[in-house]
Image (cartoon, rainbow, N blue to C red):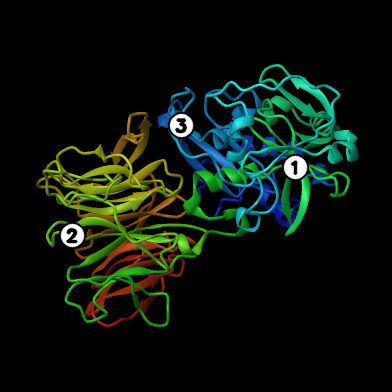
């Protein structure tokens, strides 16, 4: 469970920058702090000047930030950032007095109970299965017999059970737990490690605390505050740990592939582990609760803590390269194009489901393959299908969906659903539908549950939505009768309802004027710029503007049509479609040098989708 220290020089460079809440899962800045208060809390215990010689309280650096639903937050969202050992969050941006407004989340309670919290009230939850992630040791695929959070459900205090243990002060810890939650006695371990004997009892939740954990939470030493090294009590146990929700238990777990006896105790916010064979200073450690919770909440996103940057995604486009009279979805990253779809009607890609797990990366597309007439939304794997099975997502052409899936079903209707745009965390899809008249923006859960919610519609045509990388806002194109296309921006606001996806767009405003058509907006991976196509020069050219619509500049200058830009995940290159060679082909643009490179194929290729 010990982890190699992050290289000091790189870490110091990382800490020179405190980013606003735009840092997000796949913007390339996930290892920077999303809020200055997160850095202040982290540096107290884990700054290299004070952390050496003891285990981490949070981890060597953050590795992912996001805007997660929290109904009482601003617009129903809160800023969170994940570390190996925990998650930091800011629920109330107006209350910054205590720890800069940072809280720590009852992540362990959620994983044991299966109640994923979406708000401050007890009923603001999404019911899931308890986490089958090992509470200690190697990852689950290397540690298949170790107890999981689900194993502790019968011996932990969660909302449903009011479970309490009787006080056992000064008694040895001899109870062990296995993966099935069965308890056995290990007198040998109690005798071998008398320092683990019970030294405290928490009256609030009714649990005994092992002596080694009491000492760990009360330890004095060096800590960082305001950029200065000080000495004293290192942590506030209630803020950092919460109250215990279980007694301490022995378990067997693989660590580095070797079986060990590990003492574990679950707290509301953290897990503490004691491995007597570890070196001094590292025998008691915080469990990797941040990693564990992330795997439970976002199983489709993979393991970002194992990667130095965002996942590289292939370029995908709609193309007739395989001698079909209609468009198919084609990958362009190999030596020769590879078809991802085949059928008798066209399929057009629109967005990715990103993942740090190669086998879970998907492309969302729309196709008429259902009834041959109406565009519907589909999910297609980019490589293999184990983590991203091909499936249909909407059923608005009247086709009955499979049992258990109701996304977009119109039992008496026949509508078009298209332009599916996946949220950065892969949990929600915004798409366009004409099910209620003119095409409007809808939102639906990405897992196939619930029903679509009208997100924004005013009687005008709304289409081509693109998420900001922090998941807080959208840009899209809008056309009212008799007017040109304009690019719009709006902030997402969430409310609780039976679908757990009640949402609307607020602060809606145009980013472009009425002088010409402005279309195909795509937000940059860092959320700071928008690439789009403008016809203000008499033909389509690629333009860039700041996210507020200011600082507009033209990137291409060619008599042909340059359209539908899309960002590479590094944010340093843009791909687009152009008919410079006669038929439409995919081109790549370096926005700094303004150099354009053609990616020639047979046939015609349109609507490219790059890394973002």
Distance (Cα) linking label 3 and label 1: 29 Å
**Residues at marks 3 and 1 touching, judged by CB atoms closer than 8 Å:** no
Distance (Cα) linking label 2 and label 3: 35 Å
Q: Residues within 10 Å of mark 3 (few under 14, many from 20)?
A: many
Residue highlighted by disc 1: 46
In the image, residue 337 above or below residue 402: below
Distance (Cα) linking label 1 and label 2: 54 Å
First in sequence, mark 1 or 2: give its number.
1
First in sequence, mark 2 or 3: give its number.
3
User: From the image, which quarter does the C terminus lie in?
Assistant: bottom left
62 with respect to 93 (left or right): right
Q: Is residue 33 shown to the viewer in this render?
A: no
Q: Which mark is residue 118?
A: 3
**Element class at badge 1:** helix
Q: Position of residue 551 (x, y in %)?
A: 39, 51
First in sequence, mark 3 or 1: give its number.
1
Q: Residue 270 carries which label?
A: none
Compare residues 529 and 413 and report the one nearer the observer.
413
**Element class at badge 3:** loop
Q: Quadrant of residue 51?
A: top right
Q: Residues within 10 Å of mark 1 (few under 14, many from 20)?
A: many
Residue highlighted by disc 2: 370
């Amino acid at each position: 469970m010990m982890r190699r220290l992050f290289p000091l020089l790189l870490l110091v460079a990382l800490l020179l920058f405190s980013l606003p809440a735009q840092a997000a899962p796949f913007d390339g800045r996930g290892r920077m702090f999303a809020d200055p208060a997160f850095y202040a809390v982290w540096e107290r215990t884990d700054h290299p000047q004070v952390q050496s010689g003891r285990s981490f309280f949070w981890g060597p650096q953050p590795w992912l930030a996001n805007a997660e639903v929290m109904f009482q937050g601003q617009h129903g969202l809160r800023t969170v950032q994940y570390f190996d050992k925990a998650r930091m969050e800011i629920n109330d941006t107006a209350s910054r007095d205590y720890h800069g407004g940072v809280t720590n989340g009852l992540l362990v309670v959620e994983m044991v109970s299966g109640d994923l919290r979406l708000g401050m009230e007890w009923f603001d939850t999404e019911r899931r299965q308890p986490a089958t992630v090992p509470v200690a040791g190697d990852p689950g695929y290397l540690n298949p017999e170790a107890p999981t959070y689900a194993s502790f459900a019968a011996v932990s205090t969660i909302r449903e059970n009011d479970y309490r243990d009787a006080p056992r002060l000064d008694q040895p810890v001899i109870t062990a737990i296995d993966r099935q939650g069965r308890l056995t006695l290990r007198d040998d371990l109690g005798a071998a490690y008398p320092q683990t004997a019970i030294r405290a009892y928490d009256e609030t939740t009714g649990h005994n605390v092992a002596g080694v954990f009491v000492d760990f939470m009360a330890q004095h030493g060096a800590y960082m505050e305001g950029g200065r090294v000080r000495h004293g009590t290192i942590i506030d146990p209630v803020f950092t740990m919460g109250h215990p929700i279980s007694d301490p238990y022995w378990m067997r777990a693989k660590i580095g592939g070797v079986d060990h006896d590990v003492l574990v105790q679950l707290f509301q916010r953290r897990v503490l582990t004691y491995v007597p064979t570890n070196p001094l200073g590292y025998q008691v450690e915080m469990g990797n609760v941040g990693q564990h919770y992330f795997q439970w909440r976002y199983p489709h996103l993979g393991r970002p803590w194992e990667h130095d940057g965002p996942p590289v995604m292939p370029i995908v486009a709609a193309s007739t390269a395989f001698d079909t009279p209609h468009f198919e979805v084609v990958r362009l990253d190999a030596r020769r194009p590879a078809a991802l779809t085949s059928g008798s009607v066209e399929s057009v890609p629109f967005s990715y489901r990103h993942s740090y797990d190669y086998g879970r990366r998907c492309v969302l597309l729309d196709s008429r393959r259902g009834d041959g007439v109406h565009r519907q939304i589909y999910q297609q794997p980019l490589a293999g299908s184990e983590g991203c099975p091909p499936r249909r997502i909407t059923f608005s052409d009247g086709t009955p969906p499979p049992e258990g899936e109701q996304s977009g079903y119109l039992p008496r209707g026949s509508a078009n659903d298209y332009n599916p745009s996946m949220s950065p965390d892969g949990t929600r899809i915004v798409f366009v539908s004409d099910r209620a008249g003119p095409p409007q923006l809808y939102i639906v859960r990405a897992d196939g549950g619930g029903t679509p919610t009208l997100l924004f519609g005013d009687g005008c045509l709304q289409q081509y939505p693109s998420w900001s990388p922090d998941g807080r806002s959208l840009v899209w194109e809008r056309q009212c009768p008799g007017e040109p296309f304009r690019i719009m921006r709006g902030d997402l606001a969430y409310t609780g309802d039976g679908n757990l996806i009640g949402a609307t767009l607020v602060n809606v405003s145009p980013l472009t004027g009425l002088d010409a058509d402005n279309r195909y907006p795509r937000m940059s991976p860092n959320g700071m710029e928008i690439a789009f196509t403008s016809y203000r020069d008499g033909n389509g050219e690629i333009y860039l503007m700041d996210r507020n619509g200011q600082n507009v500049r033209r990137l291409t200058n060619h008599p042909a049509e340059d359209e539908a830009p899309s960002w590479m995940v590094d944010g340093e290159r843009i791909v687009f479609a152009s008919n410079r060679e006669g038929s439409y082909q995919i081109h790549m643009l370096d926005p700094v040098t303004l150099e354009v490179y053609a990616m020639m194929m047979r046939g015609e290729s349109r609507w490219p989708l790059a890394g973002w």
